[in-house]
Image (spheres, helix red, strand yellow):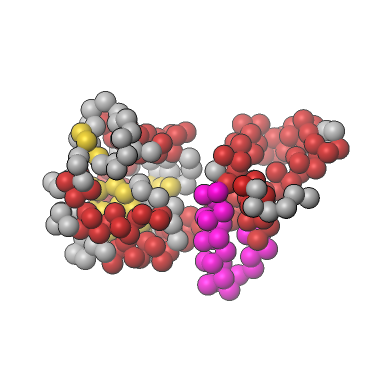
Amino acid sequence: MGEAGRCYAADLLAAGHAVVAFDPADVPFPDGVERAESPARAASGAGLVISLTGARFAEDAAGQVAESGAGVCFADFNSADVATKRAVEAALPGTPVADVAVLAPVPRAGARTPLVVSGPGAGTVAEVFGPAGAAVEVLDAEVGAAAGRKLLRSVFMKGLAATVLESVSAAERAGCAQWAREQIAAELGSAELVDRLIDGSSRHAARRVHEMRDCRSYLDELGAATDVCDATITWLRRLTGDAPTA
């Protein structure tokens, strides 16, 4: 029941689904969401299990759900690398797993946020989230394929953010930061996007460092160049205070 979890829970309730959820912390749940005492209890009797735990806990959460013997579609919505997605599937023998890549910040559109899905459970995710308003691209591919697509997209999106940060940071020193922002916004077609790229990078820098390292590893596996990944990691580390400033 983090930020994304609350958005999804509320929207799925509004779409007519019953929602049962577990969170180890004493956090507020949206009205109408039943609080379960464990992951296994939350999954028991479900038609679809959604995991939004963060990549570090994804495999462990899958193992706890496996204890319930639910056998229903397990949809891993976490931003994680390909290896983690496959480890989640291995923790759930006999369960159709869906590797779900979320393609935009969930608070902006909730259950309508675009998705790319792969794995045996992909069709179930499309059946639930398509009617809720999401554009769901189903890949005829194994678990890990959607995660790979998300990593490739992140190279562009986080790299774009790093480019904007570098330009605006330099413009601040030149005394024309607002002019630079306006020029970038004119090219991208959205001042809101520029603000989101800058503010989001600062707010989520620590998490995005890990994401970009996953991107770099994936590109290494593909034998592709990683120059943009390397530069983006440097910028994100700088935002966390873990790299020297210019």
Q: Is residue 204 left or right of residue 167?
A: left
Q: Name the quarter where the N terminus is drawn.
A: top left
Q: Which residues are magenta?
A: 206-229
Asked if 98 appears above or below 224 in the picture, the reply is above
Q: Is residue 231 left or right of residue 136?
A: right
The answer to whether any part of residue 57 appears in the image is yes
- Residue 139 lies in the magenta-colored region: no
- Write the residue at 25% across / 42% down: 22
- Write the residue at 63% across / 50% down: 236
User: What is the total number of numbered labels drawn onto the structure image?
Assistant: 0
- Write the residue at 64% across / 68% down: 225
Residue 129 locus on image (x, y percent): 32, 42
Asked if 242 appears above or below 133 in the picture, the reply is below
Q: Is residue 64 left or right of residue 229?
A: left
Residue 153 locus on image (x, y percent): 54, 54
The answer to whether any part of residue 193 appears in the image is no
- Residue 222 lies in the magenta-colored region: yes
Name the residue furthest top. 31
Which corner quadrant of the image does residue 66 belong to?
bottom left
Residue 54 locus on image (x, y percent): 40, 50
For the stretch drawn in magenta, what is the main secondary structure? helix
Q: Nearer the viewer, residue 133 or 221?
A: 221
- Write the residue at 31% across / 49% down: 51
Which corner quadrant of the image does residue 97 belong to?
bottom left
Q: Is residue 25 left or right of residue 109?
A: left
